[in-house]
Amino acid sequence: MTAFLLIETQCGAMSDRFLTDALTLTRTGQQVTVLLVADAVTAAVRGTNTLVPELVSAGAHLWADEFTLVQRALRAAPLESGVTVQDIARVADIVVADDVTVVWH
Amino acid sequence: MTVIERRMWDLLVILTAPPHTTDALTTVLRLVQSVLDQGKSVRVWACGYNTILTQASLGDAKPANLRDPDQTAPSAATLIRHLVTDHPRRMSWIVCTACSKERGASTHIPEVRLRSDARLAQTIATARKTIYIGGA
């Protein structure tokens, strides 16, 4: 089974559409990891985005980029349950893995 | 018939999202450095306004920060130069000639390669994985 790494860098309506696509993909049984980085990292903070807990419930892996959290003074903010903080080295592992499709938005 | 096998690169990043409007360039540079740290090979194809990042006229350092004039920060060209020179044969920065010409970015640092957009498909074919970052 192909795994997907979906990298979200934006916030707002277009980001919600991308996360909705991620949700659809997850519900079809695909292995989906969503990385929230740059402007998208605020969606990892508890209560800011309704799609994030839905993605977690559906079985997607939700990652928040540690560098971005620190850069935006959000490292101590409460994150949505199920969101894990990852550094870029872990992301790089997945990006170059053979059976992972990467989509950047 | 002689068959010439082309070298395969582990990762190709096609960067068309404009720099300095979002964190895209910073995120790409962090990701590229991290992939290189794992011993893999990376190519970046710089399109659109990313072609101005490697102009020689940028110099080695950014203009002085007046709030902290003793501190110097490397220019984008310097960061890219070090990425290439610190990882010989594993890192390549390609500048799209059409986008470069369109924007008057004529003189680049010698560490980057200039390549016609007609060779983009061939460049993709020699990468095990390609990430396209749109937004130009």
Image (cartoon, coloured by chain):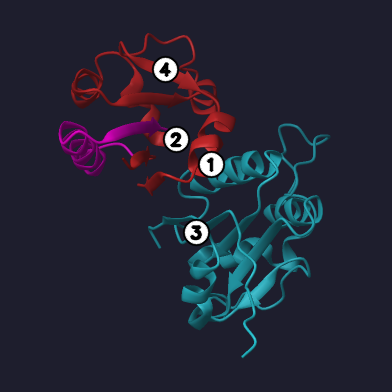
Chain colours: A red, B cyan
Residue density around tag 1, few if under 14, some if 14–19, many if 20 or more, within 10 Å: some
Instruction: Name the amino acid, label 1.
Output: Thr
Subunit under mark 2: A
Q: Residue under circle 1?
A: B27
Q: Amino acid at mark 3?
A: Leu
- For the record, the magenta segment spans A10-37
How busy is the neighbourhood of tag 2: few (under 14 within 10 Å), some, or many (20 plus)?
many
- Residue ID for mark 2: A38
Q: Which residue is disc 4 drawn over?
A: A84
Q: Point out the frontmost of discs 3 and 4.
A: 4
Q: Amino acid at mark 4?
A: Thr
Quick one: label 4, few (<14), some, or many (20+) residues within 10 Å?
some
Please give the label number shown on residue B15: 3
Structural distance between the alpha carbons of marks 2 and 4: 16 Å
- Are the two marked residues, 2 and 1, in contact with CB atoms closer than 8 angstroms? yes
Mark 1, chain letter? Answer: B
Q: Quadrant of the N terminus of chain A?
A: top left
Question: Picture coordinates of residue B12 (x, y %)?
Answer: 54, 58
In the image, what residue type sits under mark 2?
Ala
